[in-house]
Image (cartoon, rainbow, N blue to C red):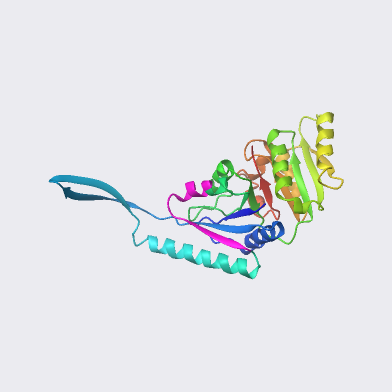
Amino acid sequence: MRKLLLATGCKQPESATLDFACYLAKMTGSKLTGVFMEILKHKDILVTSLQDDVLQMDIKTDSSMPENEAARSNCEQMIEQFKNACISRETTLAVHRDRGVPWDELIMECRYADAIITDINFTLKEGVDEYPSHYLKKLLHESECPVIIAPQRFEQIDEIVFTYDGSKASVHAIRQFINLFPELKDKKVTVLEIRTDHEQNIDEHYRLKEWLNLYYNKPNFVSLEGDSKNRLLEYFLSHQNIFAVMGGFSRNRWSRILQPSASAPVVKLLPIPLFIAHP
């Protein structure tokens, strides 16, 4: 991996998010690019002119509104804090300041990046307290590169946990992770499989094990039964310093762990990073 993005939204990333982003960037030798979206209000102005005795009319967009000064100032402060955080953590950095249509520009940034990091607080709208926010779910759906949700607390990575249900999305996520993080090849690896149908394809299991053995030393396979969301939460909360890999958001049952529900406060405090990719 060479290009790693950090999406900030309208809120300054927390210290743990910056710690984690800089950790991954340094580990992979990547440049950490902070993407700052300057979210401005606009008004349309009618501009008239007389040319060759013909009245010309045009609509122009004006963003020089007093209320935008606070948005510009906030963006500049976030950029300065990001720079200082990267310098203090000895991380190579770059800054992209998106001013046009911020959301469209963010998605375009993803198209030309290896992965993008954000956290559970990511939003483009002030005062949002839903977890995950509308904009985080939108990013998970529309991003053209893997999305990594940073944990609320971070120390180190000791174990990789691949969530697996036999779907194309879960295998794609594993492949993406392997290709992006060869530096983690010596970490403990667990394949976490939750079956509700009590069925297991032996040939499929053999092929997965054979494939993973080419990259990791003796991956451990754990099979759990029951409600997938609850069992995943139980497993993640009982393990520390793990990096969880999941298939497409809202495309299979693994993604239910992120959907708004009674478990949302638990998800907000989940002390592990989540790597999410879809085909």
Q: In this view, does 47 lie to the left or right of 131?
A: left
Q: Where is residue 114 in the image (x, y as percent from the top left)?
A: 63, 49
Q: Is residue 21 above or below residue 163?
A: below
Given residues 130 and 169, the one toward you in this image is 169
Quarter of the C terminus within the rendering: top right
Residue at image point 61% right, 45% down: 145
Q: Where is residue 56 in the image (x, y as percent from the top left)?
A: 20, 45
> Residue 247 is drawn in which quadrant?
top right
Q: In this view, does 77 lie to the left or right of 243?
A: left
Residue at image point 64% right, 50% down: 148
Q: How many marks?
A: 0
Residue 97 appears anywhere in the view: yes
Q: Where is residue 190 in the image (x, y as percent from the top left)?
A: 81, 46
Residue at the far right in the pictured view: 218
Residue at the far left in the pictured view: 53
Given residues 139 and 225, the one toward you in this image is 139
Given residues 187 and 266, the one toward you in this image is 187
Q: Give the range drawn in magenta.
A: 92-108
Residue at the far front in the pictured view: 52
Asked whether residue 205 is drawn in magenta, I would say no
Q: Where is residue 150 in the image (x, y as percent from the top left)?
A: 65, 55
Q: Is residue 151 left or right of residue 239?
A: left
Asked whether residue 94 is drawn in magenta, I would say yes
Given residues 6 and 159, the one toward you in this image is 6
Q: In this view, does 267 lie above or below 171?
A: below
Residue 237 appears anywhere in the view: no
